[in-house]
Amino acid sequence: MTDKTSNDPLHGKTLEMILKHLVQYYGWEHLGTKIDIRCFTNDPSIKSSLTFLRKTPWARKKVEELYITLIENKQF
């Protein structure tokens, strides 16, 4: 039997899990400088950020790319 593993670094990761890891690693203030979106800079919360990211594909893509960069650089 072959072992099918995904090459996708986001496989099995939820957006909430990714966001929580980024907030834990960077903090809201620094995350807001890395990705300049209002939900990270003005009264940030996981809930409001998830709502925005789920409705805004370009912002979600930036968050996912930042997470992948952390994983690839083994900083996380």
Image (spheres, helix red, strand yellow):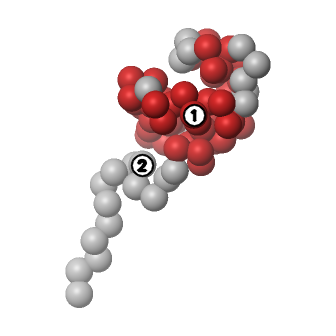
Taking the image as shown, residue 41 lies to the left or right of residue 37, namely right
> Looking at the picture, does residue 4 appear above or below residue 6?
below
Q: In which quarter of the image is residue 23?
A: top right
* Percent position of residue 47, x then y: 67, 37
Q: Position of residue 68 (x, y in %)?
A: 44, 38
Residue 15 in sight from this viewpoint: yes
Q: Determine whether the residue tagged by mark 1 lies in a helix, strand or loop.
A: helix
Q: Which is nearer the eye, 45 or 18?
A: 45
Give the labeled residue for mark 2: 10
Q: Is residue 37 left or right of residue 42?
A: left
The residue wearing badge 1 is 51
Mark 2 Cα within 10 Å, few/some/many (few <14, many 20+)?
A: some
- Quarter of the image where one finds residue 28: top right
Closer to the camera in the image, 21 or 76: 21
Determine whether, in the image, residue 40 is placed left or right of residue 18: right
Whether residue 76 is visible here, answered yes or no, is no
Q: Which residue is drawn at 58% across and 36% down?
A: 50
Quarter of the picture holding the N terminus = bottom left
Q: Residue 65 in the image: x percent, y percent?
A: 42, 31
Image point 33% across, 51% down: which residue?
Answer: 8
Q: Which residue is drawn at 44% across and 26% down?
A: 56
